[in-house]
Image (tube, rainbow, N blue to C red):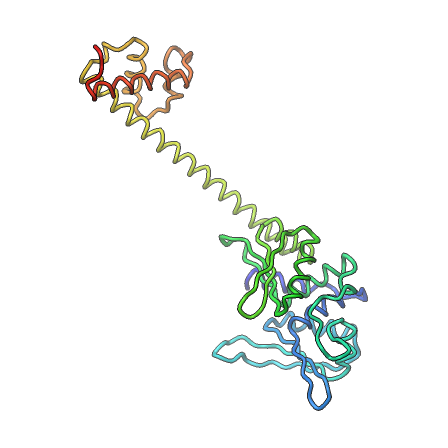
Amino acid sequence: MSYASEMKKELTLIEIDKDESFLSELSALIKMNGVLTIANGSLSISVQTENPAIARRIFSLIKHFYDVHINISVRKKMKLKKNNVYICRLDSKVKEILTHLYILNNDYTLKNKIAEQLIDSDEKKRAYLRGAFLAGGSVNNPRTSSYHLEIFSQYEEHIEDLKNILNSYDLNARSIERKKGFIVYVKESEKIADFINIVGAYQSLFQFEDERIVRDINNSVNRMQNCDLANMNKTVNASAKQIEDINVIEERLGLENLDEKLRVVAEARLQYPESALKEIAEMIDDGKLSKSGLNHRMRKISKIAQELREGNYEF
C-alpha cells in the first residue's frame, strides 16, 4: 500500500463524534466525489471512491448525522482497470442534506465556493482539509526524490478557497489548472509535514519525519563526499601543475639556483606530490610558514617557470 493510501486509511479511523467539524469533512467528501442526478423531479446523489476505507468513512458520517437509507454498491472500473469503485447512493432527503452541508443552493445549483459556516473555526478548517484530502488528495512517499502534496478539484473557485485555507496555516500553497480541473499543491517538506499534522494523521507524520530525516542525512553525507572529492581533485590538479612548473625549472635552471625559500618549497612539493598546501606548509620551517605564505612562494615558482618557457627569464 502506498504512503498516501496508508495516510488516508489512518484519517478514516479518526473517531466520529457530534462535533460539527465532522460535517465539514462530510461536506468536502460529498462535494468533491459526489454526482447529483435529477430524474422525474427527484434528487439522488452518488458518492464514488476507489478506496474502500473512504467509502466506509462516507457511509459512517452520513449515518451518524442523518437518518437515511444508504445504498452501497461495488463495480469494476472500465477500460481494463482492475480497481473497484465503491458507490454510496442516497435517494431520500437529498436536498435537505445537501443544503445542510452547504453544497446545494435553493435553486438546485451547486455551490462552487466553500461556505464560511464550514470553516469558521480551526477544527472545522482542519476537518474540511481532511475531507478534501480524502476525496482528491495525494502525497509523494517521503523516500522519493521530491516532496509534493496536492488536492484536485473540478472547480477553480473551490481550489482557490482551499488554497486560502492552507495558507491560513502558512503552508505556501499554490494552485494551477490541470487538464480536467484544478489542483492546489505544497512542495516544501516542512510544510507538507505541517499539513499532515493539521489533518490529524499523526502516525503518518512520524513516518514522514523519520523518512525525511534519513533522507536529509543521506543527502548531507553525499554533499560532504562530493565536496571532499572536489577538494581532492582540486588538490591533485594544482599539485600536478606545480610539479610541472618545478620540473621546467629543474631542467632549464636547476633548483639549486633558486632562492633558498623557493628551493625548499619546490623540493617539498616534489617529495609530497599528493599533499595539500596546508600540509606542506606545516612541514616547512617547523610549521611557521602559513598557507598564504606558501601560496605566495608557489606563485613565484610558477612565474619563473613561465618566463623560462617563454625565454624571458633573466639569469
Between 147 and 12, which is closer to the camera in this rendering? 147
Q: Position of residue 184 (x, y in %)?
A: 61, 60
**Residue 13's quadrant in the figure?**
bottom right
Between 135 and 315, which is closer to the camera in this rendering? 315
Q: Is residue 178 left or right of residue 115?
A: left
**Residue 118's quadrant in the figure?**
bottom right
Given the current orientation, which residue lies at the most extreme front position?
312
Q: In the rendered view, tell whether residue 302 sits above or below residue 259.
A: below
The residue at 63%/66% (across/down) is 156
Q: In the rendered view, tell whether residue 217 sits above or below residue 94.
A: above
Q: In the rendered view, tell whether residue 9 sits above or below residue 189.
A: below
Between 293 and 47, which is closer to the camera in this rendering? 293
Q: Is residue 85 left or right of residue 298?
A: right
The residue at 68%/72% (across/down) is 31
The residue at 49%/52% (across/down) is 145
**Residue 290's quadrant in the figure?**
top left
Where the N terminus falls, by quadrant? bottom right
Given the current orientation, which residue lies at the most extreme right position?
18
